[in-house]
Image (cartoon, helix red, strand yellow):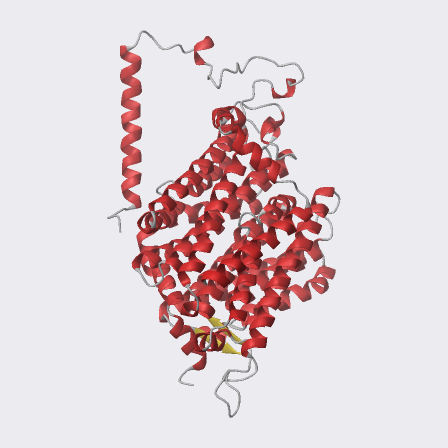
Amino acid sequence: MNGEAILPYLIIIPLFGAFSMPIVNLLGRKAREAWAVLISGATLIVGSGIFYSVWDTKEILVYTLGAKSPLGQGVSFPIRIVWEVDLFGAIMVLMVTLVSFLAVLYSLGYMKHDTGLDKYYTLIIILELGMLGIAVTGDLFNFYVFLEIMSIASYALVAFRNDTWEGIEAGIKYMFVGSIASAFVLLGIALLYGQYGTLTMSYLAVKLAESPSVTAKVALALFIAGLLFKSGASPVHMWLADAHPAAPSSISAMLSGLVIKIGGIYALTRILFSIYGASISVKTVGWVIIIFACITLVVGNAMAVIQNDMKRLLAYSSVGQIGYILLGLGIGLAAYGSQTGETAMAGAIYHTFNHALMKALLFLIAGVVIHQLGTRDLNELSGLAKTMPKTTFAFLISAAAIIGMPPLNGFASKWLIYESSAVFNPILGAIAIIGTAFCTAAYVKVLYTFLGRPGESVMKAKDPEGSMMIPIILLTAAIIVMGLFPWQISDKVMIPAAKALENQLAYIGAVLGGA
Amino acid sequence: MFGYWDALYFVFVFIIGLILAYILDKWAKRSSMGTREVGDGTKIFISGEDPEEVIPGFEHLEGHYTGRNVMWGLTYALKRFFTALKADHTGLLTDYVSYLVIVTAFVMGVLLIWG
């Protein structure tokens, strides 16, 4: 399969789908829903194709907008917008297209009683488009544009249900403080452009290695702070606990499963490894990330324990899991070039993917519970297992996976992170285990509630209809199946992705060639 | 780095564990003074709360175990830690922005000195 030929369709299809939605909407509800499923399904096919192509050929895909070569005529440096996909980017593409498709499918049943659904489906596809753009772009300003497309769609979707104060308040808070974080990122880009005169990531990497400067360090600090915010790292995680529970559950699944990964973790990793790479003190940056990771995984998981609101508990749990991913990323940087660093980075990438599946599933389950009972207060959900056995089973699997229980997928990725952190610094390994202890307490609390004695209100509940059940079944199956082949996935996909990420020269060479 | 692990081994261990638990249960029932199958003996004991008891004002929660009961020990033991965490999560927009500024300043300081 020619990955470069299909790469533009990854953006074209959702872009066309989103903006044609208001017209399709004129044909009625069924046409609108079919269109949304068709567009996200087609994007999933293209995304899978791109992943397979990059994984199979082990080459970096490069696509130049408006020309054959990114280099200008008569000059040896790139002047055009470039899209560049390595294995890490391809994994993110697969993750985004898969979870988005399932979220759209789930929305058919979950959102059917809501109004303004043409706007909802337009926004959800735009959200997917923004995330895909971030995953494929090789141009820093283009990255910012996609980051804003994703963020603005997120703000709107958080406040989509505007009949309650909760969504509006969360949406406004998220928008206000999120815009400040985005402004930091934009300022960082402006500083780099002013200093080095280019926005192409690979060429910027060359320039940075040639002449590192204080400006570049200031820009990096702005990137790190802005993107830590976007990833929901503690202590800048508080918006997340407001925004993610307030959104409709299908959107919460995308926000917690995808947005914080792509807009935060992926972007940070790309900037640190592919742009800055060896031109900064990786050890210092690594330790900065590790400090935030440790705070995040303890605070996030601990806050989850004391929540009585199911979705808020899941949101805090997302903060905790981001801590593990950041820990892997931090060790990957601090132990740059060693086997420990490589294992940590592979664990971080693996956990990013796994957590997307697990958290998407957990939020979809929370949505089912809200749909059936109209509440997300854990005190009123006792005994749900009696009346919603399939949903409870899916919850059991996803909770066990997120805790890191073998033989599910979360175990494999967490193991790689524990293993590398214990080798790198045993204290970090101990902190990671403390985080997991809190995480276990939080999920046991929910599970115990589900398995308790049923109350009267719970007796009326039942497992949801097909369109809501199918994504839940698919995600549960994915978690179980991925857990059965941890070695194979780790060795064949995640370790090569970590290696590709560390190979900055290959990333630069893919765009600049011999120039 | 730490040697070999395989998910299938965990499945086997889990199945063996289930079989052992079943055998142990059977053995305990046979050799004990007698297991109470009805009455108070079957009640689950959670943090001293009687599930049958109705607390005035909390009738809607009658007999429903909630996760709060299970984690009572943990939350009580770490009360000060949790209280400090809760106090920090004010929900105020100004606090969110302050934390963002503090994080930026911290990262910038570290990078400028050691980066």
Judged left or right of residue A433, residue B50 is: right
In the rendered image, residue B45, in percent from the top left (x then y), is placed at 46, 16
- Front residue of A483 and A186: A186
Q: Is residue A29 left or right of residue A397?
A: right
Which is nearer the eye, A514 or A125? Answer: A514
Extreme residue in the front direction: B113
**Closer to us: A136 or B29:** A136
The answer to whether residue A76 is above or below residue A195 is below
Residue furthest to the bottom in view is A74
Q: Position of residue A156 (x, y in %)?
A: 69, 55
Q: Answer with the quarter of the image where residue A282 lies.
A: bottom left
Please indicate, yes or no, whether residue A2 appears anywhere in the rendered image. Answer: no
Q: Could you tell me if residue A109 is visible in this image?
A: yes
Residue A504, picture quadrant: bottom left
Q: Where A48 falls versus A438 (above or below)?
A: below
Residue at point 42%, 57% (across, down): A286
Left or right? Give the position of A180 relative to A285: right
- Looking at this view, name the residue that lies furthest to the left: B3
- Compared across the picture, whether A236 is left or right of A433 comes to right
The image position of residue B27, as x and y in percent, is 27, 16
Residue A40 lies, with reference to residue A369, above or below; the image says below
Point 47% across, 48% down: residue:
A323
What residue is rendered at 37% in x and 59% in y?
A494
Residue A167: x and y in percent read: 70, 46
